[in-house]
Amino acid sequence: VVVVNVPGAGGALGANRAARAKPDGYTLMSGYDSLLVALPFVQKTVEYSLDSFDYLMGYGLGALYFSVRSESPYNSMADLIRAAKAKEGALNYGSYGVGVITHFAAERLWQQTGVKMAYVPYKSSPETVFALLGGHIDVAVTAGAGPAANNPKIRILAVASEKRRPEQPNVPTLKELGYDVTLDFIAGVVAPKGLPPEVRQALITAFQKAHDKYGAELKLGIEAKADVVYTSMSGEQVRATWFDRQAWFKDLASKMKLDPQ
């Protein structure tokens, strides 16, 4: 397998290339929610949609964390939301980019709770954490805990996952705190739309054999290096989840007044 990294436009240039490739099984792409589900709503350079791909498998689940400085008066999400509502527009939060999953997840939470908070975009989740530490923002919403993990200067208030994360077992989920925001972002493998059935099945069989033989090893490696939990999801599961998310991303994008740039 030859890995080709195609930077540019938040990954859209690589996804455009993958969507246009011949559907013969020789061009695959590793993608995730921000790239495939969210970016089409906010970037004019996107030439694809969820219908442009065949879905083969999911191999990782990532988490979105809500963090504050440990010196702040906010010891819980309830404290933060209460303060934000009392001081409308006085607090701000940061995340990486505009119209990405962290941005969508935060805005979904603020809209559900009646919070109005200014948004400050950064280039990455680590940069967002450093901005939090520097006092430039009040809240950091990050993809993965990253430099916020086990940092005594940071208090992680919640994670937007279906269940608590093994790497941060003491951090409650938004769901268990009573907020309807659950977004484990998926890392998956897709191919250009139109794979012949026999080629699709050969690829799925190969992925399953790799999982059966190297799953334990992959679990250790990916969780340590990529801040995601290793999993084995079918292409059908990935497709269904992303199409479901597309519906509420689309609704939220209009409320956020996100115009493609």
Image (cartoon, rainbow, N blue to C red):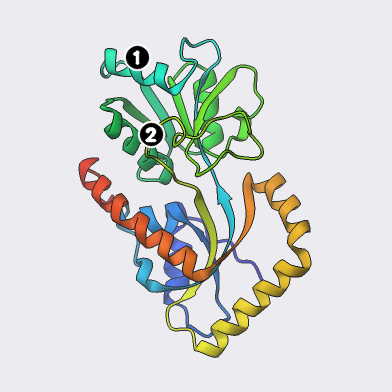
Separation (CA) of disc 1 from disc 2: 17 Å
Residue 87 image-quadrant placement: top left
Residue 28 lies, in percent from the top left, at 55, 72
Secondary structure at badge 2 equals loop
Seen from the viewer's position, the closer of residues 235 and 136 is 235
Q: Are marks 1 and 2 in contact (CB under 8 Å)?
A: no
Up-down relation of residue 12 to residue 74 (above or below): below
The count of marks equals 2
Q: Which residue is pictured at 71% across the width and 74% down the height?
A: 209
What quarter of the picture does the N terminus occupy? bottom right
Residue 149 lies, in percent from the top left, at 63, 30
Looking at the image, tell me whether mark 1 or mark 2 is earlier in sequence order. 1
Check disc 2: other Cα within 10 Å, few if <14, some if 14-19, many if 20+: some
Query: Which of the numbered marks, if any, corresponds to residue 69?
Result: none
Seen from the viewer's position, the closer of residues 168 and 118 is 168
Q: Which residue is pictured at 50% across the width and 15% down the height?
A: 75
Up-down relation of residue 234 to residue 73 (above or below): below
Eye-nearest disc, 1 or 2 = 2
- Give the amino acid at mark 2: Tyr
What residue would you read off at disc 1?
83
Query: Which of the numbered marks, if any, corresponds to residue 179?
Result: 2
On screen, residue 76 versus residue 229, left or right, reads left
Does residue 88 appear anywhere in the picture?
yes
Residue 40 lies, in percent from the top left, at 33, 58
On screen, residue 196 versus residue 260, left or right, reads right
Up-down relation of residue 209 to residue 257 (above or below): below
Q: Which residue is pictured at 75% across the width and 50% down the height?
A: 220
